[in-house]
Image (cartoon, helix red, strand yellow):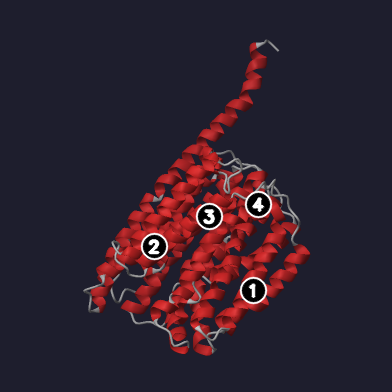
Amino acid sequence: MAPSRRAETPIERHVWVVAGVVILGMIMSILDTTIVNVALATLARDLHSGVAAVQWVITGYMLALGATIPLTGWAARRFGAKPTYMVSLVLFTVGSAACGLSSAIGPLIAFRVLQGVGGGMLMPVAMIIMAEVAGPQRMGRVMGVVSMPAMIAPILGPVLGGVIVQSLHWSWIFFVNVPVGVLALAMAARMLPHTDSGEAGPLDLRGLLLLSSGLVGFTFGISELGAGAPIGSLKVLLGGLLGLALMGAFLASSSRAARPLLDLRLYRSRIYSGAAFTTLGASAALFGAMILIPLYYQVVRGDSVIAAGLLTVPQGLGALVAMPLAGRISERLGGGRVAVAGVLLLSISTVPLAFLGARTSLVYISAILLVRGLSIGLCFMPAMTAAFAALRPEQVSDASPQLNVLQRIGGAVGTAIVAAVLAGASRQARTPAALAHAYDKTYWVALAIAALSLLPALLLLRAERADVRERSAGEQHPQAALEGAGL
């Protein structure tokens, strides 16, 4: 039994104003996860550093993101979502300016960590604010718009980075954030409302240390695997296994804490747990395969970074079209149905990519990417919408960092697996045709990841249907009792 159609609750102008303000901050943070990638060679040359040291410009930022996200929910409850968001903006903007002014690799890495501390809180706090302002009845439509930067920025980041590196000094990769950050801060101070995220309670310091350390270790191990380290290497095993052990200790500690850092009781809700693990699976499927097409254009076909970025635009256009529609449809039909359709479409659109050659038509590839973009909007946004719709308002500050953690873990795992498979498949490839065949093999692995992500989406669909049946039975029971009493 499908969720019943509901009349749409109108969205007032102030909700869209708040959405516009938080999008400004979010897009900076997400762009910075990919915009620096294209400048690594330039940074190594200008700062007289090796590639291994320069790689920490990216790794340090990613580790800081992972370490900071768990703190977000408590900070929003303790200090308020608006002040937390504004402090995050200040840290990110100051860190960006300091990165641009750096003249040595050590300070640059340190200020990238500062950037990551601010950037790690921007996305989850923005989601907390929007969930509280929009409310569950309008969450799908609003988040369909607000979350578009999360899908588009990773695609546009290398293009923007390539243009800056070729036209300006590399420091402008960081300086470009400063005016945007100042504008976002001014708008936030004036336009963001003060919201109530619930009682904070004392900070679960043990939980924070365990989870943040675990995420840092796991992310580091997975990043090393994706960068080409063997799966049995000390860095991968020590980082990955230690990270998993610390996260396991966090789960045990949370079960005993009076007010844990993250409320894991949310997973007692079948809808929330189904949506959360759909987010995990979809992130692994989407972000893992997302690195392949730009690399295919550059490595197999010999295109420039800018050209490769522009050739991925159809995927971004598909996501832009699908995400607002997916939010609206999810409100009416339930996120499970739409997520299942999206994951199926993602899987189907992966199959043609497993047969690419060195000279496959660009029009053909662009058409496939357009379909994949549609699937991005259809499988990612509905899961987030379903998760927030299943919560009470005071639970949002716990759910937002959890969903962001799952998204980043899924993306890191998917990317590492795909990168490791590609490295192995292309090791002996010497010709464009052989390289294309290596990418074909890797896309079969990407298809397997997408197919596996269908399982939690089906669980979400099943949970939503069970919830509808229970609510229908509850609504019918009072009438049945009256009839049985002869009234």
Q: Nearer the viewer, mark 2 or mark 4?
A: 2
Q: CA distance from mark 2 to mark 4?
A: 33 Å
Q: Quadrant of residue 44?
A: bottom left
Residue at 26% of width from left, 72% of height from top? 426
Residue marked by disc 3: 209
Residue 125 higher or lower than 315, as above or below: above
Q: Nearer the viewer, mark 3 or mark 2?
A: 3
Residue marked by disc 4: 131
Q: CA distance from mark 2 to mark 1?
A: 28 Å
Q: CA distance from mark 4 to mark 1?
A: 25 Å
- On the image, the x and y values in percent for residue 298 come to 37, 79
Residue 21 higher or lower than 46, as above or below: above
Q: Nearer the viewer, mark 3 or mark 1?
A: 3
For residue 213, side relative to residue 391 (left or right): left
Q: Could you tell me if residue 146 is visible in this image?
A: yes
Identify residue type, mark 2: Gly
Identify residue type, mark 3: Leu
- On the image, the x and y values in percent for residue 209 come to 53, 55
Residue marked by disc 1: 93
